[in-house]
Amino acid sequence: NVNGLSLGFGPSDGLFLEPEYVDGFEAGVKSTLLDGRARLNSAVYYYEFEGQQLNSTLNQSAVLTNIDTSDILGFEANLQLQATDRLYLQAGASIINAEYGNFINNRGRDLTGFEMARTPPWELNFLGEYVAPLQSGASLAFQADVAIRDEMYMDPGRPELSTIPSVTMLG
């Protein structure tokens, strides 16, 4: 990202942001199994940020600030299976370790080593769909899904006050 202007005031003594740089590495596998009825995709990734730009709050105002360093290491996998002509299943999982490196927030608090805001450590999702053919030639589909997400916090300036608990969503 290019330099920007932040209208919030923090310990950085200035309105202008430093540029954000990221080095990213990813390796993955995409595979087709069971004579084409299944697909398994997975990836591991690593991002190293310098000057990451982050939204926060200070005195009830939005503030954009730079973080000296931060790192993200993650893994994700997704399985899709056409179990029968009528039954389709899908499952996914992600695990992420996202931490601030050297970071003093706009309240002067040292968040070095803290989990990154808005980043749940893990997520799971499952989906099932059954298609019932009708005598008219049309079909009726039934689908259910569930997504489960670990807790996370929203504001790096106030992690203890902005935690969102783990959640399970059904659909």
Image (tube, grey):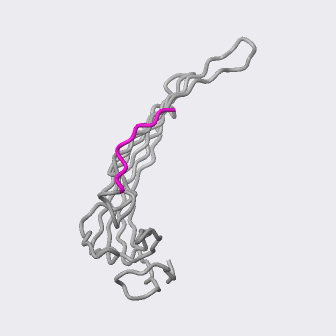
Quadrant position of residue 146: top left
Residue shown at 24% from the left, 70% from the top? 112
Say above or below: 24 vs 88. below
Q: Nearer the viewer, residue 142 or 26?
A: 142
Say above or below: 108 vs 171. below
Residue 164 covered by magenta stretch? yes
Q: Position of residue 106 (x, y in %)?
A: 35, 75
| Residue found at the far top of this picture | 135
Residue shown at 56% from the left, 23% from the top? 130
What is the magenta segment's predominant secondary structure? Answer: strand
| Residue found at the far front of this picture | 59
Q: Is residue 142 left or right of residue 91?
A: right
Q: Is residue 40 left or right of residue 140?
A: left
Q: Position of residue 14 (x, y in %)?
A: 42, 88
| Residue found at the far bottom of this picture | 13
The residue segment tinted magenta is 162-171
Residue shown at 37% from the left, 48% from the top? 94
Q: What count of labels does the image hold?
A: 0
Say above or below: 157 vs 50. above
Residue 142 covered by magenta stretch? no
Quadrant position of residue 45: bottom left
Quadrant position of residue 132: top right
